[in-house]
Image (spheres, rainbow, N blue to C red):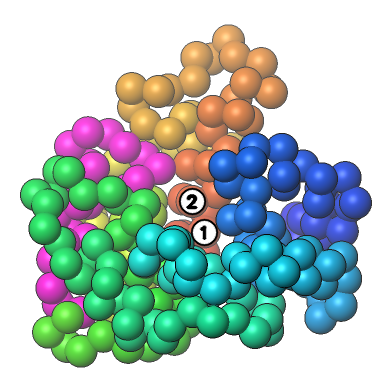
Amino acid sequence: MTALVERVWRSPEFVRLLALDPRYARQFQVMYAGLAPAPEGPHRAVLARLAADGYLAPNRKSPYLRLETRYYADLAGAPHLIESYRELYEASLLARRALPVADLDVCNVTHTVFYLSDFGFRDSGLTSEERERALRVVEELTEHSVRRGEWDLVGKLLLAQFCLGADPARTPSGAAGLRLLARAQRPDGAMPGRSSTDRVDESATPVMLFRKAYQATLVTALASLIISASPA
């Protein structure tokens, strides 16, 4: 699987595909550069274009987009003008939480945790009080997403709990989330869609199954691998 991903990453055609949707092209391009499997490669030209366009500077990007850009630029070893992780956290939706939990953007909250903690592989930089507060928000979102049968979001939230220092198997919301995913998972390990209301019909073609299920399947696999690989 790793070899397949790297082969796709190195394909010149893949670089072109990243720019098909102008709304997300530069986001995808900085991710592509940050996840480079080698120090040198086609991503260097992509980074040069992003820098020339001013994308590696704050400009008028939201706090979340600045955090995302900094994380992948740092992974790529690219110079940038974006503020510190501490400042980005303080400006984040997770830190401010002015909305009821049900109205929060789960992806914004979980990805903020992922980028601050490098998906659980470094300290998030949060104080004990901030970490506990963030964990309460994530647990409430987990409970809400479990009730709604949101498989994709539950997988992200379980990983966010882990990144904040919790064991998802030992929190009530995390245990409920694990049970939800285990019940939904197909025998081959795939998730049958992004949610219980978006389940792929058994008669679906392999292409349709992939389009509807690949994201929830990857999220579940990523969360499972990171959490299970952690020292006890």
* Residue at mark 2: 219
Could you tell me which quadrant the C terminus lies in?
bottom left
> Residue 55 vs residue 177: left or right?
right
- What secondary structure predominates along the stretch shown in magenta? helix
Choose between 191 and 117: the one closer to the eye.
117
Query: Measured along the vertical axis of the image, is residue 148 above or below residue 81?
Result: above
Q: Position of residue 165 (x, y in %)?
A: 28, 79
Q: Residue at x 62, y 68 (%)?
A: 54
Characterize the local packing of mark 2: few (<14), some (14-19) or many (20 or more) Cα atoms within 10 angstroms.
many
Q: Identify the amino acid type marked 1.
A: Leu
Choose between 225 and 164: the one closer to the eye.
164
Q: Identify the amino acid type marked 2.
A: Val
Query: Measured along the vertical axis of the image, is residue 138 above or below residue 78?
Result: above
Highlighted range, magenta: 131-154
Q: Quadrant of residue 174?
A: bottom left
Could you tell me which quadrant the N terminus lies in?
bottom right
Q: Residue at x 76, y 65 (%)?
A: 49
Say if residue 228 shows up in the picture. no
Residue 50 — which label?
A: none
Q: Count the numbered circles shown.
A: 2
* Residue at mark 1: 222
Please check the rendered image and state whether residue 120 is part of the magenta-colored stretch, yes or no: no
Q: Residue at x 48, y 71 (%)?
A: 58
Q: Residue at x 22, y 42 (%)?
A: 146
